[in-house]
Image (cartoon, rainbow, N blue to C red):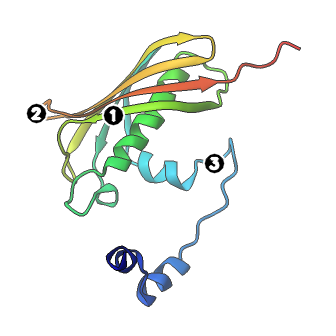
Amino acid sequence: MNKARNLLSVDDRDSELVSRLTIPTHRIHIDRSFYEDMTLRGIRVDRVQPGFVSCSFKVPSYLSDSNGKLAAGAIANLVDELGGAVIMSEWENEMNNVSVDMSISYVSAADVDEELEITARLLGKKGGFFGTNVVLKNKITGDIIAEGRHSLFNKHASKM
């Protein structure tokens, strides 16, 4: 227990650095959130067609783990964001998707500054339920970094 407590404790220097952070208030449907901006910064959209999105992404150091690899949480966020984006590629109306389920297979690692290709496909739709598949690959070698299945739900407007 003491080992965990020591690991999670914050020293005065870290506390001071965090206290100086300024994070603007998020305006829903107007601004991207701090979280979205951190992950999506640097993504270049290569191709969009109904049910398909292809992007390029150079792994930034601020999304790396302690080993200098793309962090698992960043990969999960990319699967979440691009899974939602592929739905928007087919339905242009405003959508308020809620992630229902996400399953990610982490196959290999991506180093900082490595160029990735990310493809997202719409697998299907039933009512307000959507299924997507997102694959992250090394752009040079073609090695799969991760593959995610992502289910989302969008509440339809009431007919009443």
Can you name the residue that lies furthest to the front here?
Answer: 1
Q: Earlier in the sequence, mark 3 or mark 2?
A: 3
Q: CA distance from mark 3 to mark 2?
A: 36 Å
Residue type highlighted by circle 3 = Asp
Where is residue 62, by image quadrant?
bottom left
Q: Which residue is mark 3?
A: 31
Residue type highlighted by circle 1 = Ile
Dot in front, 1 or 2: 1
Where is residue 64, by image quadrant?
bottom left
Percent of width and height locating residue 79: 40, 35
Badge number at residue 104: 1
Percent of width and height locating residue 54: 35, 26
Q: Is residue 52 left or right of residue 87?
A: left
Please tell me which residue is depicted at 47% across the width and 36% down the height of the picture: 81
Crowding at mark 1 (Cα within 10 Å: few <14, some 14-19, many 20+)? some
Dot in front, 3 or 1: 1
Please tell me which residue is depicted at 32% across the width and 77% down the height of the picture: 3
At mark 2, the secondary structure is loop
Badge number at residue 141: 2
Between residue 143 and residue 98, name the one nearer to us. Answer: 98
Q: Is residue 5 left or right of residue 37?
A: left
Percent of width and height locating residue 35: 51, 53
Please tell me which residue is depicted at 62% across the width and 11% down the height of the picture: 127
Percent of width and height locating residue 149: 38, 26
At mark 3, the secondary structure is loop
In the picture, which quadrant includes the C terminus?
Answer: top right
Quick check: 52 above or below 18?
A: above
Can you name the residue that lies furthest to the right here?
Answer: 160
Quick check: 9 above or below 105?
A: below
